[in-house]
Image (cartoon, grey):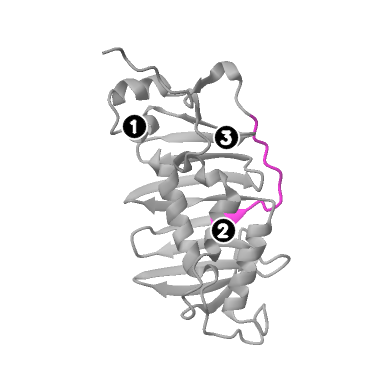
């Protein structure tokens, strides 16, 4: 299930560029965040978003050349519920308690196990079934680790110039200021809420290898993640018996 890790990496990489990267332009007096540089606005946005108890992230990105659509609601306790779609198929994901469950269609499992022996049989057997997957596996649980996912926004403090304040617009009815940055052929725009807490509302990346758009919403709303009934779950965390020689 490399696709989960790839999505996490692609969105985080875009976020790192704008997260706490230095900025060169001061805001004009008629803009929100008066007297604050784009650097300061970005830093506050990353902190507010990281400190939120929960959020929803939804959008479409390109991961390793594949279009990937996600819609996940996560919280700081790793409660998580969402859906992801790749070209080959789609899957629902739930993380509740200490377990992660994935229910994908045949196309999803075929893509996830494309290098495995008996791929077709395995995809058919798992299609439409809930599968309990290893919690420690970053490939399957990365998107449900809100704090780990967003912590990477703070990781790159070496880039100290290039970001500028942009227009004031709206994202899903909320006023937001755009922060722009060009980096190695990529243009990245971060939209920060201008009213209330300065949450990140949208991230847009164009150009480069992983273009896409992710919208952040439903801040501080509870995540209703309930494990599927035990009788409907295949336990993929147990080692399979080895065939006798």
Nearer-the-camera pick, 89 or 137: 137
Q: Quadrant of residue 154?
A: bottom right
- Tell me residue 127's x, y (percent): 42, 24
Q: How many marks?
A: 3
Q: Which residue is mark 3?
A: 94
Q: If you read the primary sequence from the N terminus, does the residue marked by circle 1 or circle 3 appear first?
A: 3
Query: What's drawn in magenta, residue-wise?
Result: 215-226
Q: Residue at x 47, y 25 (%)?
A: 236
Please tell me how crowded label 2 is: few (under 14), some (14-19), or many (20+) other residues with Cα within 10 Å.
Answer: some
Foreground disc of the pair 2, 1: 2
Q: Which residue is mark 1?
A: 113
Q: Which residue is mark 2?
A: 151
Relative placement, left or right, of 241 versus 219 is left
Q: If you read the primary sequence from the N terminus, does the residue marked by circle 2 or circle 1 appear first?
A: 1
Q: Residue at x 51, y 73 (%)?
A: 21
Mark 2 vs mark 1, CA separation in Å: 30 Å
- Tell me residue 199's x, y (percent): 65, 63
Relative placement, left or right, of 163 versus 123 is right
């Amino acid at each position: 299930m490399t696709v989960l890790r790839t999505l996490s990496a692609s969105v985080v990489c875009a976020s790192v560029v704008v997260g706490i990267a230095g900025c060169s332009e001061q805001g004009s007096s008629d803009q929100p965040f008066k007297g604050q540089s784009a650097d300061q606005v970005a830093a506050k946005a990353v902190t507010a978003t990281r400190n939120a108890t929960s959020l929803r992230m939804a959008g479409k990105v390109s991961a390793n050349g594949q279009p990937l659509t996600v819609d996940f609601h996560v919280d700081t306790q790793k409660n998580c519920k969402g859906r992801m779609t790749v070209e080959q198929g789609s899957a629902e994901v739930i993380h509740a308690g200490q377990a992660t469950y994935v229910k994908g269609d045949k196309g999803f499992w075929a893509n996830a196990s494309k290098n495995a022996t008996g791929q077709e049989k395995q995809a058919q057997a798992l299609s439409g079934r809930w599968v309990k997957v290893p919690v420690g596996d970053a490939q399957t649980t990365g998107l449900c680790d809100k704090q780990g996912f967003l912590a990477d926004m703070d990781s790159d403090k070496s880039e100290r110039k290039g970001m500028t304040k942009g227009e004031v617009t709206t994202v899903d009815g909320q006023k937001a200021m755009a922060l722009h940055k060009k980096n190695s052929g990529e243009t990245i725009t971060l939209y920060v809420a201008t009213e209330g807490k300065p949450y990140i509302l949208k991230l847009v990346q164009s150009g480069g290898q992983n273009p896409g758009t992710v919208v952040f919403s439903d801040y501080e709303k509870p995540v209703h993640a309930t494990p599927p009934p035990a009788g409907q779950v295949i336990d993929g965390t147990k080692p399979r018996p080895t065939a006798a020689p």
